[in-house]
Each structure stands twice: as structure tokens, then as C-alpha cells.
């Protein structure tokens, strides 16, 4: 498994490098993760040992911590894309899997908080799959 990853935001203003491996890869279906991704679930990688290095755009990173919770998110102030964040007083690196530009050779560890998933998030894999945009 690779121990070096690179990534960026959608507009390319923020670029970063991750050195080290990930201990877990969770697909979280809680309402907070659904709200901050606008999707069925968040897809985040977690590491207590990997190191984050901002290559460009660090000044464009904004972090949001939901008051009264442990829910946190970092994002690009230009395009809004999720980017890595350091959480739990510097003890945990959380990396949105979709922000990586290098291949990830790790499968999801688990779907979590599925009891809170959206009512429309049931057997999504059975929906028709189209290679390009729909006609």
C-alpha cells in the first residue's frame, strides 16, 4: 500500500500531500455528514500517524466546527470543496477520500451510522449505471 498521497480541491487553488497510511476509511451516513457533503454519506479516511503538508493554498482553507458536537469540516473558501482537517487537538487527520488525486488502494472499512441514513439511500447500487452523462 502506498504511504504517500496527493490531493487538491476542485478549483485547484489548494494542493496537499499526505505522508503515511490510514487506519480506517468510513462511509458515514449521519445527518451531519449528509448535510455537509450534500450526498448519501461522507467518505473519510482517518489516520493518527500520517502527516499533512499543504503545497499551495493553505490560506484558503477554512474550518467549521459544529458547536456542541465533535463534527468538523475543512473546505476551500473559493470552490467549497472538502479538504483534509486536523482534529481532536492535533491527534487525528481526517481526509475526504474524494479530495485525493492519487489512487487509493484501500477499501472502505465500514458504512457507519446507517440507522440515520436518508430514506432514499436504500440499495443505491441497484440504480441504473450510465458511463457518461444521461441523455
Image (tube, grey):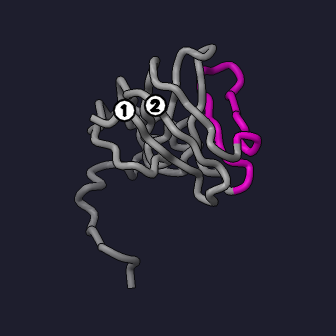
Q: In this view, does 64 lie above or below 16?
A: above
Q: Where in the figure is residue 117, as x and y percent of width and height?
A: 41, 39
Judged from the image, the secondary structure of the residue bearing numbered disc 2 is strand
In the displayed structure, does residue 83 sit left or right of residue 68? Answer: left
Q: Residue at x 60, y 17 (%)?
A: 90
Of the image marks 1 and 2, the number of the one nearer the N terminus: 1
Q: Residue at x 28, y 38 (%)?
A: 106
Task: Give the residue at mark 1.
Answer: 3
Q: In which quarter of the image is the N terminus?
A: top left
Labelled disc at residue 19:
2
- Calculate the distance from the C-alpha at mark 1 to the C-alpha at mark 2: 6 Å
Q: Where in the figure is residue 45, as x and y percent of width and height?
A: 42, 33
Q: Which of 81 and 105 is in front in this view?
A: 105
Q: Residue at x 58, y 34 (%)?
A: 53
Q: In this view, does 73 lie above or below 126?
A: above
The residue most toward the left is: 126
Q: Which residue is drawn at 34% across and 43% down?
A: 104
Q: Where in the figure is residue 78, as x and y percent of width and height?
A: 73, 55
Q: Residues within 10 Å of mark 2 (few under 14, many from 20)?
A: some
Q: Quadrant of residue 64?
A: top right
Q: Is residue 29 above or below residue 120?
A: above
Residue 51 shown in magenta: no
In the displayed structure, does residue 60 sit left or right of residue 133? Answer: right
In the displayed structure, does residue 108 sit left or right of residue 32? Answer: left
Q: What stretch is highlighted in magenta?
A: 58-78
The answer to whether marks 1 and 2 mark residues whose Cβ atoms lie closer than 8 Å is: yes
Labelled disc at residue 127:
none
The residue most toward the bottom is: 135
Amino acid at each position: 500500500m502506498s504511504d504517500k498521497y496527493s490531493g487538491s480541491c476542485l478549483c485547484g487553488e489548494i494542493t496537499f500531500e499526505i505522508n503515511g497510511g490510514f487506519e480506517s476509511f468510513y462511509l458515514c451516513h449521519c445527518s451531519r455528514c449528509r448535510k455537509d457533503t450534500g450526498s448519501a454519506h461522507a467518505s473519510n479516511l482517518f489516520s493518527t500517524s500520517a502527516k499533512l503538508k499543504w503545497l499551495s493554498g493553505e490560506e484558503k482553507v477554512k474550518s467549521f466546527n459544529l458547536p456542541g458536537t465533535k463534527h468538523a469540516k475543512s473546505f476551500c473558501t473559493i470552490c467549497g470543496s472538502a479538504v483534509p482537517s486536523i482534529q481532536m487537538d492535533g491527534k487525528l487527520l481526517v481526509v475526504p477520500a474524494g479530495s485525493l488525486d492519487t489512487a487509493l488502494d484501500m477499501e472502505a472499512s465500514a458504512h457507519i451510522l446507517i440507522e440515520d441514513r436518508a430514506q432514499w439511500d436504500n440499495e443505491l447500487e441497484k440504480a441504473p449505471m450510465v458511463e457518461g452523462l444521461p441523455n
